[in-house]
Image (cartoon, rainbow, N blue to C red):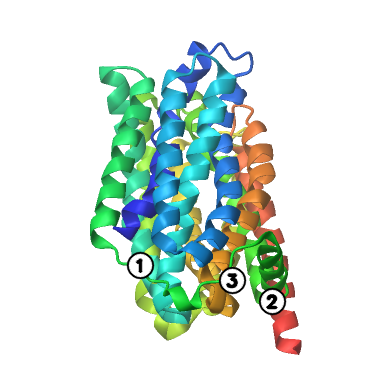
Amino acid sequence: MLALMVSLLALSIDAMLPALGEIGRDLELADTNDAQLVVTAMFLGFAVGQIAAGPLSDSFGRKPVIYGGYVIFIIGCVMSMAADGFAVMLAGRVLQGLGAAAPRIVSIALVRDGYEGRAMARIMSIVMAIFILVPAIAPAIGQGVMLVTDWRAIFGLLLVMAVIAFTWFAARQPETLAREVRRRFSLGNVADGVREALGYRAMTGYTLAAGIIFGAFVGYLSSAQQVFQSAYDTGQWFSVYFGAAALAIGAASIVNSKVVMRLGMRYMTWRALIGLTAISCLFVPVVLAGDGLPPLWVFMGWLLVAFFCTGILFGNFNALAMEPVGHMAGLGAAVVGSISTLISLPIGWLVGAAFDGTVMPLVTGFAVMGAVSLAVMWWTERGLAEA
């Protein structure tokens, strides 16, 4: 159930990827790269929604906030489905992001209410492993819908999925935040909580590192349709290649869930981040030798290894950042999610908008952002060791 709630965001993004070209043509976009805003607008709403959903869930309970999020998401789906201009489309996507933030971020607080440390990392890895099946099949779902009808029906499918998730959650999930431990809601309390959360070096550092490397991943999501369908001319096989890369993240999440209790979050995170950076740096000259487009099987080899490392990072960075803030898990999850997403958006836009018919911007983005994330993680743990 939690995996389905977390997956709503991924489904809303990845099912739209095969439709970006058609959306751009139907809504008469002058620059084909502008269609990537359908992805980034969703992330923008998501970033803003998290910072509201977390504190509200700490004050009013987890369930009411998640209910409200689903309602906002459904309204956004209706707006995008009926859009006759790109501005309305983007407004609907922002609302979808706002709404999806509640089930996505409050779900983490639900887990943190009962677990912490390595146990939380293990549970989040299991949730992520199930969740990753959605991005693996979502483009195929979107493409299948478009074979029968047009891109607007994809938003109808998202609406139906939101109703199913809402109903399941309402029927099965008890409230996890007792009334006596809820924080009184006020902007002052929220500001104090944010300041307290950012005062923890571990939370600030790991959140920054996560946002930086997530930026490269957002760049991939934004430009994946162009990379596979325009650069490599895969046609309807796009969803197969995209799904294979997504499954690499899922496999990493499963591996992490089985070994993190023994090896620890920091050990796994260091190795994965070093591996991601190294393989991306080593792949840059391969891309240059191939005039920006190495053979597809070579590119997929890099992508699978890079995404396996990325899958190790996702669950662990969240759990590491959340360790100091168990007493305010909702606000803590909101700060981690919101800041990391806001950091990732401009990075993702730069990487995606740099698409020039080759994979060089994407590979370079992972190499550079991996190195920067490593530097931030080193700074974080050096300060923790000295404290």
Element assignment for label 2:
loop
State the image coordinates of residue 251 (x, y, percent, origin top left): 35, 60
State the image coordinates of residue 137 (x, y, percent, origin top left): 31, 41
Residue lying at 29% horizontally and 17% vertically, measured from the top left: 149
Q: Residues within 10 Å of mark 2 (few under 14, many from 20)?
A: some
Residue lying at 76% horizontally and 88% vertically, measured from the top left: 386
Residue bearing the label numbered 2: 200
Q: Quadrant of the C terminus?
A: bottom right
Please name which of the two marks, 1 or 2, marks the residue nearer to the observer.
1
**305 with respect to 379 (left or right):** left
Check whether the beta carbons of the residues at disc 2 and disc 3 lie within 8 A of each other: no
Residue bearing the label numbered 1: 175
Q: Residues within 10 Å of mark 1 (few under 14, many from 20)?
A: few
101 up-or-down from 256: above or below: above
Q: Amino acid at mark 3?
A: Ala
First-in-chain label (1 vs 2): 1
3 up-or-down from 263: above or below: above
299 up-or-down from 120: above or below: above
Is residue 259 visible in this depiction of the protein? yes
